[in-house]
Amino acid sequence: MNIDKLAVFSELFIQLEKSFLAASDAAEGARQLATHEQSKPETQYDTVGLEASYLAHGHSQRAADLANAIEDWKVLQHKVFSNESSIDAGALVELIDSDEISKMFLIGNYSGGLKIEVSDEVVTVITLSSPLGGAMKSKQVGDEFQHPVNAKLSLEITHLV
């Protein structure tokens, strides 16, 4: 594994901060629309203000979720793993499948599905609550297991940082 874990976390924080700012800006825009004088209903069927308030709430909740994710990742970035450690949140893991294809995963509690590109390597964020994350939890380097969704695919943990 020739990828720097700090660089992965750095790129992760950049992406999460961008998403947080976008969600915050969207929430503020929807909040302004919801409270704007022209959004007051003129008839019982005029729901622009109501719809904007629902939208503002959704964007605000997304921003709060992203803020929680950022705080959680800040703690996890300091966790240290070795090849003798068990996989848990904060681990950067390399798996190789039965076709000799290597893939990198960052294990966490939030942001599952996010793709991070560092040094021409793609790292996929997965959560411990995902099928693959759950299958990897508590395993160590050298352990082999079947992919939880594609049982024909055998996986081996080759590196853990």
Image (cartoon, rainbow, N blue to C red):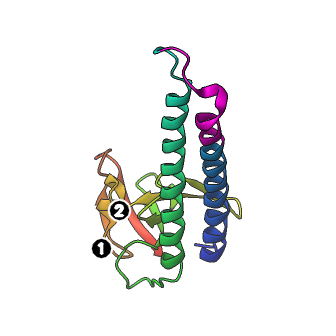
- Residue 12, position in %: x, y? 61, 63
The residue drawn where x is 32% and y is 71% is 143
Can you identify the residue that label 2 sits on?
128
Q: Secondary structure at mark 1?
A: loop
Please give left or right for residue 132 compared with residue 65 in the image: left
Mark 2 or 1 closer to N-term? 2
The answer to whether one can see residue 70 in this image is: yes
The residue drawn where x is 66% and y is 70% is 10
Is residue 31 within the magenta segment?
A: yes
Please give left or right for residue 130 compared with residue 48 in the image: left
Residue 23 vertical position relative to residue 122 in the rendered view, above or below: above
Residue 30 vertical position relative to residue 111 in the rendered view, above or below: above
Crowding near the residue tagged with mark 2, few <14, some 14–19, many ≥20 C-alpha atoms within 10 Å:
some
Crowding near the residue tagged with mark 1, few <14, some 14–19, many ≥20 C-alpha atoms within 10 Å:
few
User: Closest to the observer: 24 or 115?
Assistant: 24
Indicate the amino acid at tag 2: Leu
User: Closest to the observer: 109 or 62?
Assistant: 62
Q: Nearer the viewer, mark 2 or mark 1?
A: 2
Indicate the amino acid at tag 1: Ser
- Residue 78, position in %: x, y? 52, 83
Can you identify the residue that label 1 sits on?
138
Residue with the most extreme right position: 119
Range of residues picked out in magenta: 29-43
The residue drawn where x is 28% and y is 47% is 151
Q: Secondary structure at mark 2?
A: loop
- Residue 95, position in %: x, y? 45, 63
